[in-house]
Amino acid sequence: MLNLVKKLIHSILDLLGYQIRRNKTIEQSDDPYHAISILLNKERTLTIIDAGASIGDISQKLTTMFPLATVHAIEPYHPFHAHLEKIATMNDAYLREFRPVENRY
């Protein structure tokens, strides 16, 4: 009975040009990390390049999402690069998986 009522409500709203969606679906559609987790296989992603890594917040998130991957954080701006190096040496896990790269030219 409940399913029949749901279908009726959905049909009426569809005729009027409206749709009912769960909030979780809408929230996840705006989350780029959710999209990345769907597109990339956690076990098969072994290398990630974060070009323009800035202070490394996204690089850090990616190392947690993809624990088998080596994340190459590329940042030519020296003060940010120094911060990336600090992050890499603060945590043993980042020493293996987190590689800051600096423009040497």
Image (spheres, grey):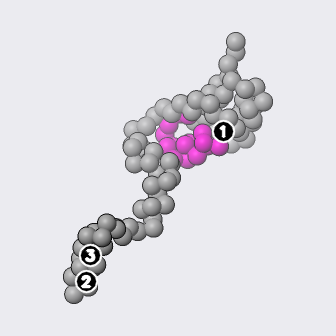
**Along the line of sight, the residue nearer the viewer: 22 or 53:** 22
Residue at 68%, 35% (x, y): give it.
Answer: 54
Q: Name which of mark 1 and mark 3 comes first in the sequence.
A: 3
Decide: marks 1, 2 in contact (CB < 8 A)?
no
Q: Which residue is mark 1?
A: 56
Bounds of the magenta segment? 56-71
SS category of the residue bearing label 3:
helix
Q: CA distance from mark 2 to mark 3?
A: 11 Å
Image-based side of 102 in relation to 38, left or right: right
Which secondary structure, mark 1? Answer: loop
Q: Amino acid at mark 2?
A: Val
Q: Relative to residue 7, is residue 66 depicted above or below?
A: above
Q: Nearer the viewer, mark 2 or mark 3?
A: 3
The image quadrant of residue 74 is top right
Depth order, front residue of 8/27 = 8
Magenta span has 64?
Answer: yes
x and y, in percent, of residue 3 in the image? 24, 80
Instruction: Report the Cα–Cα distance between label 1 and label 2.
Output: 50 Å
Quarter holding the N terminus? Answer: bottom left
The amino acid on which the numbered mark 1 sits, given as a three-letter code, is Gly
Which label number is shown at residue 78?
Answer: none
Quadrant of the image containing the C terminus: top right
Q: Position of residue 45 (x, y in %)?
A: 43, 37
In the rendering, which numbered label is found on residue 12? 3
User: How many other residues sit within 10 Å of disc 3, few (<14), some (14-19) or many (≥20)?
Assistant: few
User: Which residue is identified by label 2?
Assistant: 5
Residue in the picture at 67% in, 19% down: 103
